[in-house]
Image (cartoon, rainbow, N blue to C red):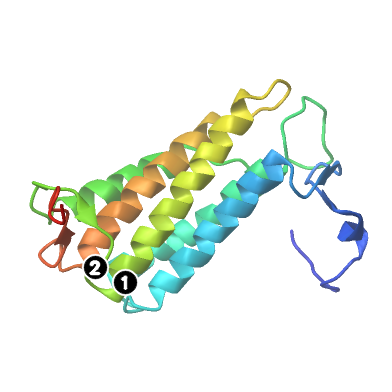
Amino acid sequence: MVKLNKIYTKTGDDGTTGLGNGERRKKHDLRVDAYGTVDEANACVGMARLYTPGSSELDAVLARIQNDFFDLGADLATPDTGKKLKYEPLRVSDQQVARVETEIDMLNARQEPLASFVLPGGSPASAALHLARTVARRAERLMVELADLPGEKVNPAGLHYINRVSDLLFVAARCANDNGKSDVLWIPGENR
């Protein structure tokens, strides 16, 4: 599927990048910004995984998320224009969304219900997962904005997926804080 012989092509020197369908867009195009932000969220999850043991259940969930983020990036990078392509474009599926929901429920079942909002922190893994969550939320906002543009389409399953993943990253951050026992809670007005 992917074969990279040469890392630099010089085709982007004019400020454009190629989409999966061969179309070229400006690097500041909203579609490019959306999949670039998904890539950024993926890098944040990779950083968080430095703090999760490689054989843990949480690390396995995060590894699947990282792979799915590449699927989502490929989905966004190949807009559905209605034109026939030489290949079947990769699309995020409802099954991926359902799997994330199952994983959220599994991780959340171990945690006490919240009585306050949680501040990012506690453990290094939790802080990194909260950062990944906020970047995923930014990607979601960009995807929603893109979907609202005339002539642009965004896979609905992709929108559902990014929304669920940011929820999963919140629950995962609590999981990394001893299932919420080490969460740093917001105290409204504490410093007034």
Residue 78 in sight here: yes
Q: State the count of labels.
A: 2
Foreground residue, 84 or 73?
Answer: 73
**Residue for badge 2:** 176
Side of 130 where 144 appears, left or right: right
Question: Percent from the top left, x then y, of residue 167?
Answer: 33, 46
**Residue at the farthest front position:** 192
Residue 75 is situated, as x and y percent measured from the top left of the image, at 64, 43
Q: Which residue is mark 1?
A: 125
Residue lying at 86% horizontally and 44% vertically, measured from the top left: 22
- Looking at the image, residue 33 sits to the left or right of residue 62; the answer is right
Q: In the figure, is residue 96 to the left or right of 29? A: left
| Residue sitting farthest toward the top | 150
Position of residue 157 relative to residue 3, above or below, is above
Q: Amino acid at mark 1?
A: Ala
Label 1 vs 2, first from the N-terminus: 1
Q: Name the amino acid, label 2.
A: Ala
Answer above or below: position of 119 versus 50. above
Question: Quadrant location of residue 76?
Answer: top right
Residue at 82%, 43% in the rendered image: 25
Mark 1 residue element:
helix
Residues packed near mark 1 inside 10 Å, few (<14), some (14 to 19) or many (20 plus): many
Q: Where is residue 127 drawn, in percent x and y?
A: 32, 67
Real-space Cα distance between discs 1 and 2?
6 Å
Residue 61 visible from this viewpoint: no
**Residue at x 73%, y 22% (from the top left corner):** 151
Q: In what element is the residue under mark 2?
A: helix
- How busy is the neighbourhood of tag 2: few (under 14 within 10 Å), some, or many (20 plus)? many
Q: Quadrant of the N terminus?
A: bottom right
